[in-house]
Amino acid sequence: MNRSVLVACLIAIVAIAQSAVWGQANSSTRDGVYTDEQATQGQAGYAAACASCHGKELQGSGAAMPPLSGTSFEMNWEGQTVDDLFERIQTSMPADSPGKLSRIETADITAYILKINKLPAGKQPLPAEAERLKSIRFEAAKK
């Protein structure tokens, strides 16, 4: 293969890869990235692992236990990825036993948090894999 054909092939491969990544980066929490069933499972997990600190209504209890719903929550996470939120929960919660939750439990609880924040459900459950979560931008629900 001559050099110009090889360069053209490499440019095409890079362009395809970039378009795939850019296409994924356009996914947002407004696109229905969890299921209602998953959020229901997450509600039970939230009640067991999170509510004692963050409150039954996700209202929080001060700076150490911030709210997981409402304007301050939305402002805190706006523009970040769902993976950022997921990994915060996965690695530091519950506060009395960080890392106790499985990735599936964390995905379910994250789905519940999205539902409470009035973000729409979809047809596929929220994934538990970091690479897939990184492609979903957190955007607050339309008011």
Image (cartoon, rainbow, N blue to C red):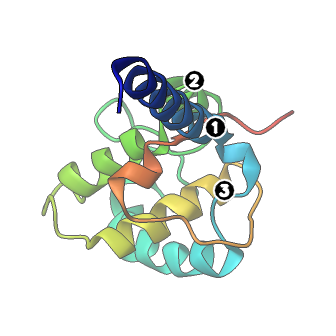
Q: CA distance from mark 3 to mark 1?
A: 27 Å
Look at 65% across and 42% down and name the residue there. 27
Q: Is residue 119 visible?
A: no
- The one nearer the camera, 98 or 24, is 24
Q: Is residue 114 shown above or below 42?
A: above
Q: Nearer the viewer's eye, disc 1 or disc 2?
A: 1
Q: Which residue type does callout 2 highlight? A: Met
Looking at the rendered structure, the secondary structure element under dot 2 is helix
Q: Which residue type does callout 1 highlight? A: Gly
Q: Residues within 10 Å of mark 1 (few under 14, many from 20)?
A: few
Residue 87 shows which numbered tag?
none
Look at 54% across and 64% down and name the residue there. 126
Quarter of the view holding residue 74? top right
| Residue 23 placement (x, y as % from top left) | 63, 37
Q: Nearer the viewer's eye, disc 3 or disc 1?
A: 1
Please give left or right for residue 92 compared with residue 29 in the image.
left
Q: CA distance from mark 2 to mark 3?
A: 15 Å
Which residue corresponds to mark 2?
75
Q: What quarter of the picture does the N terminus occupy?
A: top left
Looking at the rendered structure, the secondary structure element under dot 1 is helix
Dot 3 or dot 1: first in sequence order is 1
Residue 23 shows which numbered tag?
1
Pointer 3 and pointer 1: residues touching (CB < 8 Å)? Answer: no
| Residue 135 placement (x, y as % from top left) | 51, 42
